[in-house]
Amino acid sequence: MSRSVDYYFSLQSPWAYIGHGPFRAVADRYGLTVVYKPVLLTGLFAETGGLPLAKRHPARQRYRLVELQRWRDKRGLDFKLWPKHWPFDARLADGMVLAIIEAGLDPEAYLQKAYPAVWERELDLADSAVLSALADEAGLPGAQLVARAASSEIAAAYEQNRHDAMTADVFGSPAYVLDGEVFWGQDRIELMDDALKSGRGPYRAPD
């Protein structure tokens, strides 16, 4: 029976974009079923003590830009540190993932278009026409999915993911939850790979 990993992320997150390819490579290598769980980051930050970027100390903001350059080189990517349309309201773009899943389709093709659309192509993922076009490029019914992504039902599912994240001790993007063990950040993918390779049980915080 295939093991599964809960994948918490937002298209707003550069770290989710940077880690997406390596994460999928690990998931594919071990035959993991990926449960895609897009989540609103501002809600997680507010409830877990994190700060949005603009409210962080300038030293932390500068260090983030250095880290982005390091990981851009490390992962062999070519992206903008400050894309033209970032930050943006990711609700609709993230909601597309939920709409795709609801339709019984695989969201991976959409994500492979949407991540670089933000960080490389500098497109506006708050624009429904852009999202529709990206889905079409991925071979998906764009207009239909955009309409559904804007529905109250998808908004409720998005909110449920936030509650699920809190219950799972997830507080940022990306986070990969394997057998209840949280691997936070794309720089923990190798540690998840090690856990899968060793076959060890999940680590837990001591009582």
Image: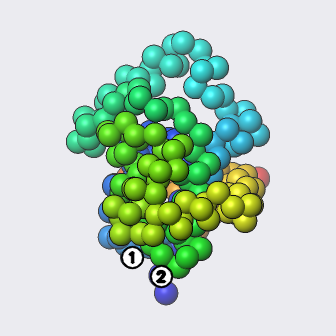
Q: Residues within 10 Å of mark 2 (few under 14, many from 20)?
A: few
Q: Is residue 142 above or below residue 189?
A: below
Q: Residues within 10 Å of mark 1 (few under 14, many from 20)?
A: few
Circle 2 SS class: loop
Gap in Å between the C-alphas at discs 1 and 2?
Answer: 7 Å
Q: Is the C-beta separation of discs 1 and 2 under 8 Å?
A: yes
Residue 106 coordinates in the image, percent (x, y) = 45, 72
Q: Is residue 61 above or below residue 20?
A: above
Q: Is residue 167 visible?
A: no
Q: Which residue is mark 2?
A: 2
Residue 140 coordinates in the image, percent (x, y) = 42, 69
Q: Is residue 181 above or below residue 16?
A: below
Label 2 is placed on what type of residue? Ser
Q: Nearer the viewer, residue 30 or 137?
A: 137
Circle 1 SS class: loop
Taking the spot 37% from the left edge, 45% from the top edge, the residue there is 117
Query: Would residue 95 be found to the left or right of residue 72 on screen?
Result: right
